[in-house]
């Protein structure tokens, strides 16, 4: 049975998006060519331009949809869940090409003149929601501004993953994120709340 046109269109778009993510992840925006993306996707130029209009539009889609394949860990919202989410993201940065490419493009977007800040605001809102739940559970210090701390966390995570990429191609990213939390938690939560938080121990740390 032939697939409905709408389903084929969705699959074609996803195929092009993921092929573009692979190329952007490998060579960045400047090094990526439409022809190379089409070859990787096994798609036609007509289908690409129907869905994305341009290379810039394709890059924007990869940035905005970088989290499309993620399945965040289950758990009650709050500090532990926030820590678990960031640990999950550290592992996904090693394995998930769409996420990795979206993050690379977001960091290097000045090279392409994309000016896409909204994705940083999106991540900050995800983190702020977890901090709001932590506030309702009495896990935050009274002085903590949830929105400001969420933005700080996005910045800290972004910088940490860049350093990890330059140092070890992100092999040590989970360990770096764990160390980041050990530094940040005292500014975020009282000692009794911190005592209840399990910070994952990365394999590199376990061997140290």
Image (tube, rainbow, N blue to C red):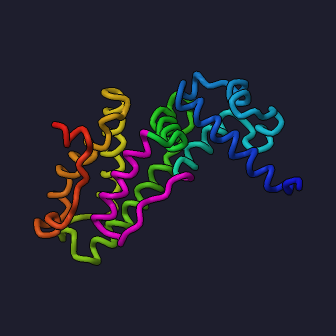
Would you say 193 lies left or right of 72 here?
A: left
Would you say 106 lies left or right of 165 here?
A: right
The quadrant the N terminus occupies is bottom right
Question: Relative to 203, is 38 above or below?
Answer: above
Q: Nearer the viewer, residue 163 or 94?
A: 94
Give residue 31's quadrant in the image.
Answer: top right
Total labels drawn: 0
Question: Relative to 59, is 200 above or below?
Answer: below
Q: Position of residue 6 (x, y in %)?
A: 82, 56
Residue depicted at 71% across the width and 34% down the height: 41
Residue depicted at 30% across the width and 27% down the height: 167
Residue depicted at 18% across the width and 51% down the height: 182
Farthest residue, direction left:
191
Q: Position of residue 35 (x, y in %)?
A: 73, 24
Is residue 78 covered in magenta?
A: yes
Give residue 126's quadrant in the image.
Answer: bottom left
Would you say 144 lies left or right of 5 here?
A: left
Farthest residue, direction right:
1
In the rendered structure, which segment of residues is drawn in magenta?
68-94
Residue depicted at 62% across the width and 45% down the height: 61
Q: Nearer the viewer, residue 177 or 158?
A: 177
Is residue 194 covered in magenta?
A: no
């Amino acid at each position: 049975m032939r697939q409905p046109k709408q389903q084929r269109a969705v699959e074609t778009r996803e195929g092009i998006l993921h092929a573009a993510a692979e190329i952007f992840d490998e060579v960045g925006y400047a090094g990526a060519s439409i022809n190379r993306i089409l070859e990787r996707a096994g798609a036609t130029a007509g289908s690409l331009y129907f869905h994305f209009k341009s290379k810039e539009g394709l890059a924007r889609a990869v940035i905005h949809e970088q989290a499309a394949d993620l399945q965040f860990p289950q758990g009650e919202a709050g500090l532990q869940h926030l820590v678990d989410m960031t640990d999950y993201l550290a592992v996904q940065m090693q394995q998930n090409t769409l996420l990795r490419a979206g993050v690379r493009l977001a960091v290097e977007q000045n090279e392409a003149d994309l000016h896409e800040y909204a994705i940083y605001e999106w991540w900050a809102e995800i983190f702020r929601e977890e901090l709001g739940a932590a506030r309702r559970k009495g896990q935050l210090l009274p002085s903590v501004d949830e929105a400001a701390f969420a933005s700080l966390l996005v910045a800290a995570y972004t910088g940490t993953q860049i350093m990890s990429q330059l140092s070890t191609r992100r092999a040590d990213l989970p360990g770096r994120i764990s160390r980041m939390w050990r530094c940040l938690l005292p500014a975020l939560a009282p000692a009794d709340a911190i005592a209840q938080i399990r910070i994952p121990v990365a394999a590199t740390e376990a061997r140290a």
